[in-house]
């Protein structure tokens, strides 16, 4: 995996996403009764927009991410607007959490970075820490994304930018397969938009489901 | 007010009662705010068709001087209450038709018309676009969202289905109102906004019901 330090320092110096994404809001609102007062993992929380939203909605939000600069930003922000939100520097492929400890999980625009082995490990880890029946929301990248065509292909599912940042992409069937062990009621929705006056398509999948009950 | 607004009144009342109102700003509009309006140092913004007020709130919080209009009184009432709850003052809200804006020429630096153009018929849309141009200052920024033909509802209409169905927002079944919506092609949009410069058109789409139902919009930005 690429060391993301410099990349993220530059990113967070430039932009901080301040507002929760509509899909995350919809997911939280649909599951709000089940999640209220309970721990939900924001896996790859970035500067913290979704952890803060969840904390303000009465959920015990735990945000984790790799770049220290993101976690620092999230803590400062949470101090002002949602003091109950917690943030940790941690790796999604090796979560410092016990099995079945989380009542829900979101991972928005985070889990597709890395090679496909890494992404598969992250998905397995996410399902490991979820309680039986707990809902999750993941954003993963589609092979229709323009970067997958344009970047150098390093394996069947993985491409790398010129800066060496790796990104893994899947089609719908591969995703269903990826989630089959451990997840139920999986719905895979497209979420796509163009850039550069319609020339390039950013193509994602927004995936919801539940951890298997009784596993 | 020339148009019948009662179905929109009901729409907003339903949304609010179901806790379904669109409360958070769209990421494209956020990019317009930070990437265009603020970068150009523009301060005075009009949102036409502000609905439940999610973008009015975004712009006001970013320190802009904001005016919002909607043809629907219940939407404006909802927005007014929300601004009060959030402690955001200074926003002017007015009930007005997009075809006849109650503002002088060249009175705004930026105009947003997010996802309502498709509910107007073609002549109304032309008048609405002329109004957008009229109230913008030269050099002013415009952002418009409207439905694209990649929407499943468009396919249903093309197949002649849906005409006898009741409106169901969640399942995407079509109401009489939905049947009248216009799905502009990229070329038609370019023609509609041909008096503007720097026109850029992006496409966005997402699905519901496990990938079987497509919702698709254009997002157009331009400069007067």
Image: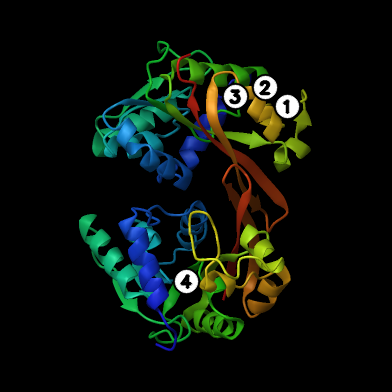
From the image, which quarter does the N terminus of chain B lie in? bottom left
**Quarter holding residue A103:** top left
Subunit of label 4: B
Other-residue count near label 4 (Cα within 10 Å), few / some / many at <14 / 14–19 / ≥20: many
Determine which residue is flagged by label 4: B111
Asked whether disc 3 touches disc 2, contact meaning CB atoms under 8 Å apart, the reply is: no
Determine which residue is flagged by label 1: A157
Q: CA distance from mark 2 to mark 4?
A: 43 Å
**Residue B186 appears left or right of B132:** right
Mark nearer the N terminus (3 vs 2)? 2
Asked whether disc 1 touches disc 2, contact meaning CB atoms under 8 Å apart, the reply is: yes
**Quarter holding residue B25:** bottom left
In front of the other: B142 or B210: B210
Asked whether disc 2 touches disc 4, contact meaning CB atoms under 8 Å apart, the reply is: no
SS category of the residue bearing label 1: loop
In front of the other: B161 or B48: B161
Q: Residue at x 60, y 70 (%)?
A: B163
């Amino acid at each position: 995996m690429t060391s993301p330090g410099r990349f993220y320092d530059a990113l967070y110096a430039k932009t901080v996403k301040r507002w929760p994404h509509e899909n995350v809001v919809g997911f939280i609102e649909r599951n709000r009764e089940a999640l209220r007062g309970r721990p939900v993992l924001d896996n790859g929380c970035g500067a913290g927009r979704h952890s803060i939203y969840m904390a303000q909605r009465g959920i015990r939000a735990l945000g984790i991410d790799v770049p220290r600069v993101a976690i620092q930003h999230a803590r400062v922000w949470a101090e002002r607007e949602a003091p109950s939100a917690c943030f940790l520097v941690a790796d999604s492929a090796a979560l410092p959490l016990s099995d079945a400890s989380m009542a829900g999980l979101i991972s928005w625009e985070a889990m597709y970075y890395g090679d496909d082995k890494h992404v598969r490990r992250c998905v397995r880890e996410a399902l490991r820490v979820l309680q039986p029946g707990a809902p999750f929301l993941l954003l993963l990248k589609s092979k229709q994304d323009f970067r997958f065509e344009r970047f150098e292909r390093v394996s069947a599912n993985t491409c790398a930018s010129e800066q060496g940042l790796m990104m893994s992409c899947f089609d719908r069937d591969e995703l269903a397969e990826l989630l089959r062990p451990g997840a139920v009621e999986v719905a895979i929705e497209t979420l796509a938009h163009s850039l550069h006056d319609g020339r390039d398509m950013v193509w994602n999948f927004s995936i919801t489901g539940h951890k298997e009950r009784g596993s | 007010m020339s148009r019948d607004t009662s179905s929109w009144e009901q729409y907003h009342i339903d949304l609010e009662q179901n806790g379904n109102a669109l409360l958070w700003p769209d990421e494209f509009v956020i990019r317009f705010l930070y990437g265009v309006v603020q970068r150009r140092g523009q301060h005075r913004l009009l949102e036409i068709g502000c609905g439940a007020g999610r973008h009015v709130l975004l712009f006001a919080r970013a320190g802009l001087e904001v005016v919002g209009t909607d043809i629907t009184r219940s939407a404006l009432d909802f927005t007014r209450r929300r601004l009060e709850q959030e402690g955001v003052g200074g926003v002017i809200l007015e009930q007005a038709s997009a075809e006849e804006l109650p503002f002088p020429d060249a009175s705004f630096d930026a105009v947003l018309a997010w996802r309502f153009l498709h509910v107007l018929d073609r002549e109304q849309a032309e008048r609405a676009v002329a109004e957008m141009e009229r109230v913008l200052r030269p050099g002013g920024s415009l952002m418009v969202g409207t439905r694209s033909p990649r929407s499943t509802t468009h396919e249903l209409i093309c197949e002649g289905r849906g005409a006898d169905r009741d409106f169901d927002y969640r399942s995407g079944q079509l109401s009489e109102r939905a049947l009248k919506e216009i799905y502009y092609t990229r070329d038609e949009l370019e023609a509609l906004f041909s008096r503007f410069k720097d026109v850029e058109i992006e496409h966005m789409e997402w699905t519901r019901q496990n990938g079987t139902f497509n919702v698709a919009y254009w997002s157009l930005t331009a400069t007067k």
